[in-house]
Image (cartoon, helix red, strand yellow):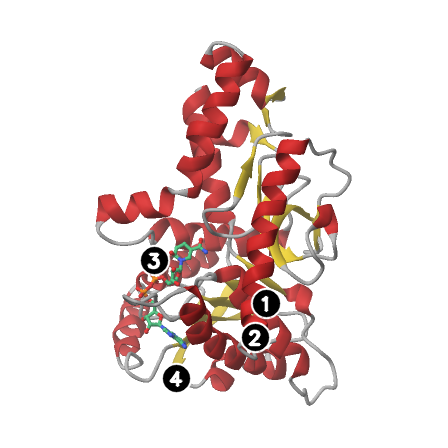
Amino acid sequence: MTRTIAVTGAAGSIAYSLLFRLAAEASAEGERIRLRLLEIPAAVERLEGVRMELEDCAFPALEEIAYTADPEEAFAGVDAAFLVGSAPRRPGMDRADLLEANGRIFAEQGRALGAGAQPDARVVVVGNPANTNALIAAEHAQRAPRTDGGVLSADRFTALTRLDHNRALAQLAARTGASVESIERLAIWGNHSNTQFPDLGGAAVAGEPAMQVLARVCGGPDAAEAWVAGDFIPTVAGRGGAVIEARGASSAASAASAALDHLRDWTHGTRGRWVSMAVRSHGEYGVPAGLISSFPCVVDADGSARIVEGLELTGEQRSRIDASAAELEEERQTADHLGFL
Ligand code: NAX
């Protein structure tokens, strides 16, 4: 089976890593893919260069590479789409200006996906503000008329918080001296922003509660709590800014790697392991229904993702989740006032 995968913002930094990793991984797995690259008209010519380089890698998986500035053409019949391209925050822009610029883009792309993508297509929104961009795209996809009479469900629209999840895994592994694969049940809740909640409450390191392991390495339970609140959470939430400061450019290769992790796990399943995905809330854990918020998720072998339910939360966990949900609700209201919902 050949999968058709669209990537927007295809001439940008994240895509420059994502496209090549995607094709290399598919080649290693013996899969076949067709790529559809989307850019704004001013940048679409650069995609000829990207196409040439992809061709020059002679990836066995790559059946076709097409590029366009027309979302309908890019998304027709796609099995998956990475929505990476978005309007950047320019000097003087406030949050509402940014939402307005992006609302237009994601409403149009949502409509094109709703009308033309496969009815079970998987959409991964990377471009910021990722959660609310995904919400706007999902909303517009529902209203798009389809020739087959179906609908691309809002549950097929997700936003990327896997980079935050991977950053959290790496920080905990470094502090405890454990390997990343020995860590389980770590979760990112809420928005892909500084209000996100990287949560170690239920996490385990090599089968032992993470807080117990941290108490041992930090010198007691209070020191462990202090490390989580004063170091771990701010480091994970502020990592994007720290990378910009150090590298002079925003996270690109790590974002691409996380986006691939997200789609791979969503397609093939997680064998019971938790991953963090921003998915549509149906009211789980008090997150208002309809918001696209990060939750701990598991994906079954048939590719159906579900939020891990039934967790008992402490007051501290509750209030951090509520704070990030409140920010998402504010973004939803701004998008609504701007006429995008
Ligand atoms: P770049 O500025 O390098 O590339 C973005 C590309 O998108 C540009 O080539 C631009 O022409 C294109 N574009 C803009 N509007 C478009 C549209 N309507 N249709 C198609 N293409 C369009 O940015 P890059 O470093 O690749 O980052 C892309 C986005 O990812 C940004 O919004 C960034 O904030 C976001 N990120 C999200 C992360 C996440 O974890 N969710 C982490 C990394 C990154 O910060």
Q: Which mark is residue 69?
A: 4
What amino acid type is highlighted by mark number 2? Answer: His
What amino acid type is highlighted by mark number 3? Answer: Ser
Ligand 1 is within 8 Å of the C-beta of the residue at disc 4: yes
Provide the residue designation for mark 2: 337
Quarter for ligand 1? Answer: bottom left
Residue at x 63% of width, y 22% of height: 207
Q: Nearer the viewer, mark 3 or mark 2?
A: 2
What amino acid type is highlighted by mark number 4? Answer: Ala
Q: Residues within 10 Å of mark 2 (few under 14, many from 20)?
A: few
Query: Badges 3 and 2: C-beta atoms under 8 Å apart?
Result: no
Above or below residue 322? Residue 41 is: below
Q: Nearer the viewer, mark 4 or mark 2?
A: 2
Element assignment for label 3? helix
Q: CA distance from mark 4 to mark 2?
A: 28 Å
Q: Which mark is residue 333?
A: 1
Q: Which of marks 1 and 3 precedes in the sequence?
A: 3
Above or below residue 260? Residue 246 is: above
Q: Residues within 10 Å of mark 1 (few under 14, many from 20)?
A: some
Residue 271 % position (x, y): 67, 41
Does 118 sit left or right of 58 as displayed?
right
Q: CA distance from mark 3 to mark 1?
A: 34 Å
Name the one closer to the observer, 172 or 147: 172
Provide the residue designation for mark 3: 17
Q: Which of marks 2 and 3 precedes in the sequence?
A: 3
Query: Badges 4 and 1: C-beta atoms under 8 Å apart?
Result: no
Q: CA distance from mark 2 to mark 1?
A: 6 Å
Element assignment for label 2? helix
